[in-house]
């Protein structure tokens, strides 16, 4: 590390290299930390988490009770012990709250003034963050499993929505109505994701074992249907190609958009080349997946070898993306983990599970240096751990 | 991979020894004074008493060369000659009987230690001092590859059981148990498939289970079997044509309608003949999987055998069994293909967790 610093100082090495090496080292040291906590507000399992891309400071969470909570992740107190407090929440007493479970929440990609949420009550709601009112509501005929808005696009404001029907709907925020329907899947759409590299490329995953890549400007159907066997490509064949041997539950593009990761209920995770749809044959082993709806997993960003964090039962499995090696399993939740997000500025991971907890996984690299100062002898313990026993109590 | 077999024999011998300690074991000296290295000044070898090596006490040279699985076969055999008591020596990085027998299952007990090994790697710390010595080791080149694993596993297949009607079939999951890195195994198998050395066949019972057969074996057996069965019947000609034209040209698992009719000139009736002969199986409207005629019996024995071996682990106390003990037990009558054959498959398919312990490898059913 010191070698890296001096090399950077003298100009022998690119500054990015030090940053990536240190980020990787921090990700390899992710652990539960008794000093970091997230306030517990939800009364039901947590289905979705999202951290805003602008500053990485605010996090949204959506739960099975329909409640949406906004947390501030930044530690502005001087102490090492810190609880991420909820800034505000849309609780059961709010007039516009979702009636059933919230499946996906996402911040507006360009600022934190707005966010969108979709739920089993067949609606997609667009919220104004400052007033906490709904700015718009889109109604659908079927329950909504997932929605996503393009993180890079400046030319369009389309939100892709995957519902229980086989058609993918694209809703336009500017006009307030559904502008497109993409046809091609045969069963419910469990996950949708826009490419972080191209404005108009969308990937959709469905319960009919297929993953399709679309260019939304094109009128005539999908671009590619991913084939796990990498067979010959031809038009007539597309109907038989499957990406997994079961439902495809989760989709995630890598941060450069060149590769796509998919997980399915056949307990496999696959890595695809997103430009030609080829299966890279990276084998992650058995990735247990029993979820009947979407599984939200995430990829790290800014490390020298990227890592993917997948909920695996009640733990989170960490793999390197391009070599398929399992690094570790993060154990800490009591029940099934449903979602996780990575904060790339501080290399922290937040995960939500059905036990109504959000856990923060923080890189722990050094033992805290004990202060020699007199004034620091006051305890910095979490008040819950403080001992209330006193020897002056009279015994019975 | 002769080392594999000698260690396997070891497992049997050790179990017998434990049952009857008065029997001597070949090659193992129980005396503490026979120490050829003392004269050279090298640190004395540990005395070969039958005490299990603790997998956490790695030798220093192993730790220095620790690298995150970037090299094919797991660990180095070291520059010493292996004795029969090899499993007790912590020469491998994650030394235990299992990683010797099944090098595809390097699952360290303590995952966080693996992460700490990776940390200096990211900073490119130069700890590769003995690299030259290691790579010139002649034992390491071939054995780690998928090709060697497939040939070795073919030896386990019981040819006599099917009276030579079936070519020896090996499963992809078995290859994973011998090759430590799955991605490398997949890619090597794909290369072999493209070169035309092996055919990969979809076995019907599980979409994920692929059977691997040498192309030569497939061609000879299918020729013999089909021609014997259908002399004079109309599909002999179609099968011959298929074997001659389609097999060498197209190495995929599946065939499509237009490919068969246009590129290779098969008529619909001929395709029906192929399906009747057992060479093709229907996948979807207009596409077919390649199949092995007569594989039904094999699949039946395989599925029953797999359930039986899993049942052996399930019925044991705490749902876990030492590998050496499992291999030493008598196979139930349902298991026709051999215990080792099934154990390779279970480990590779991750139907049991492999945990290295001080007494060897432990097979445990996963909790989920």
Image (cartoon, rainbow, N blue to C red):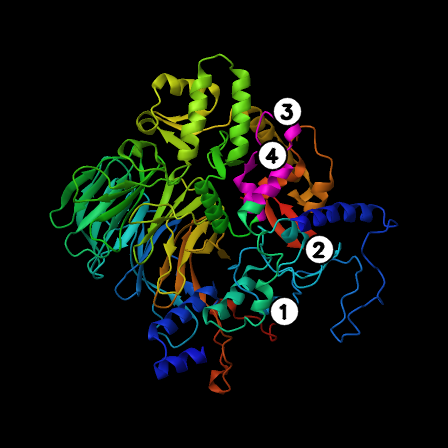
Residue at mark 4: B306
Q: CA distance from mark 4 to mark 3?
A: 22 Å
| Image coords of residue A300 (percent x, y) | 38, 60
The boundaries of the magenta stretch are B149-178
Residue B191 left/right relative to B268: right
Q: Is residue A384 magenta?
A: no
Chain containing the residue with disc 1: B
Chain containing the residue with disc 4: B
Q: Are marks 4 and 3 on the same chain?
A: yes
Question: In terms of image quadrants, where is residue B275?
Answer: top left
Q: Secondary structure at mark 3?
A: loop
| Residue found farthest to the top | B232
Q: Which mark is residue B163?
A: 3
Residue at mark 2: B87
| Image coords of residue B299 (percent x, y) | 56, 28
Chain containing the residue with disc 3: B
């Amino acid at each position: 590390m010191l070698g890296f610093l001096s090399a950077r100082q003298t100009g022998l090495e690119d500054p990015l290299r030090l940053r990536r090496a240190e980020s990787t080292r921090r990700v390899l040291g992710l652990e539960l930390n008794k000093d970091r906590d997230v306030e517990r507000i939800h009364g039901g399992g947590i289905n979705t988490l999202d951290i805003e891309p602008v500053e990485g400071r605010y996090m949204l969470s959506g739960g099975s009770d329909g409640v949406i909570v906004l947390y501030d992740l930044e530690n502005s107190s001087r102490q090492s012990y810190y609880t991420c407090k909820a800034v505000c929440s849309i609780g059961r007493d709010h007039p516009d709250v979702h009636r059933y479970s919230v499946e996906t929440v996402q911040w507006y990609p360009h600022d934190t003034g707005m966010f969108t949420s979709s739920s089993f009550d067949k609606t997609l709601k667009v919220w104004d963050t400052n007033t906490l009112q709904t700015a718009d509501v889109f109604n659908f005929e079927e329950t909504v499993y997932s929605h996503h808005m393009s993180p890079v696009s400046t030319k369009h404001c389309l939100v892709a929505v995957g519902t229980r029907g086989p058609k993918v709907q694209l809703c336009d925020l500017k006009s307030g109505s559904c502008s497109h329907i993409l046809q091609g899947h045969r069963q419910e759409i469990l996950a949708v994701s826009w490419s972080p590299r191209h404005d108009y490329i969308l990937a959709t995953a469905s319960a009919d074992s297929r993953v399709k890549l679309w260019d939304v400007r094109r009128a005539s159907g999908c671009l590619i249907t991913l084939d796990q066997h990498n067979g010959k490509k031809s038009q007539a064949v597309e109907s038989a190609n499957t990406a997994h041997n079961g439902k495809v539950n989760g989709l995630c593009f890598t941060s450069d958009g060149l590769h796509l990761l998919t997980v399915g209920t056949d307990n496999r995770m696959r890595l695809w080349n997103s430009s030609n749809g080829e299966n890279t044959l990276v084998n992650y082993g058995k990735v247990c997946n029993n979820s009947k709806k979407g599984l939200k997993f995430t990829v790290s960003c800014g490390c020298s070898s990227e890592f993917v964090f997948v909920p695996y039962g009640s733990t989170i499995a960490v793999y390197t993306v391009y070599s398929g090696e399992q690094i570790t399993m993060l154990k800490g939740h009591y029940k099934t983990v449903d979602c996780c997000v990575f904060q790339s500025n501080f290399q922290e991971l937040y995960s939500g599970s059905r036990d109504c907890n959000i856990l923060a996984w923080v890189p722990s690299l050094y033992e805290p240096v004990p202060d020699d100062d007199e004034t620091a002898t006051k305890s910095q313990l979490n008040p819950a751990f403080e001992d209330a026993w006193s020897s002056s109590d009279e015994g019975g | 991979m002769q080392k594999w077999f000698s260690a396997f024999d070891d497992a049997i011998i050790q179990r017998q020894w434990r049952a009857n300690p008065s029997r001597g074991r070949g090659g193992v000296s129980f005396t503490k004074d026979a120490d050829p290295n003392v004269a050279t000044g090298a640190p004395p070898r540990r005395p070969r008493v039958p005490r299990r090596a603790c997998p956490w006490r790695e030798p220093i040279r192993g730790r220095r060369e620790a690298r995150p699985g970037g090299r094919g076969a797991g660990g180095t055999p070291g520059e010493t000659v292996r004795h029969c008591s090899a499993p007790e020596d912590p020469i491998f990085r994650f030394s235990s009987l299992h990683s010797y027998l099944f090098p595809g299952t390097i699952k360290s007990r303590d995952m966080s230690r693996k992460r700490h090994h990776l940390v200096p790697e990211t900073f490119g710390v130069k700890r590769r001092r003995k690299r030259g010595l290691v790579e010139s080791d002649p034992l390491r080149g071939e054995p780690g590859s998928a090709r060697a694993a497939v040939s070795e596993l073919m030896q386990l297949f019981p040819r006599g059981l099917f009276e030579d009607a079936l070519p020896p079939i090996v499963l992809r999951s078995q290859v994973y148990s011998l090759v430590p890195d799955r991605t490398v195994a997949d890619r090597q198998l794909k290369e072999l498939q493209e070169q035309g050395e092996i055919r990969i066949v979809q076995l019907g019972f599980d979409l994920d289970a692929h059977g691997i057969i040498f192309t030569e074996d497939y061609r000879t057996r299918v020729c013999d079997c089909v021609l014997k069965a259908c002399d004079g019947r109309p599909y002999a000609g179609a099968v011959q044509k298929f074997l001659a034209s389609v097999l060498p040209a197209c190495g995929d698992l599946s065939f499509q309608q237009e490919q068969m009719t246009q590129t290779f000139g098969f008529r619909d009736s001929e395709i029906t003949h192929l399906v009747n002969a057992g060479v093709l199986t229907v996948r979807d409207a207009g596409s077919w999987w390649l199949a092995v005629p007569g594989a039904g019996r094999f699949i039946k024995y395989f599925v029953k055998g797999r359930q039986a071996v899993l049942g052996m682990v399930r019925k044991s106390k705490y749902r876990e069994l030492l590998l050496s003990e499992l291999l030493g037990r008598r196979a139930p009558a349902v298991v026709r293909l051999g215990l080792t054959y099934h154990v390779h498959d279970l480990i590779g398919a991750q139907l049991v967790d492999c945990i290295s312990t001080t007494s060897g490898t432990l097979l445990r059913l996963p909790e989920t």
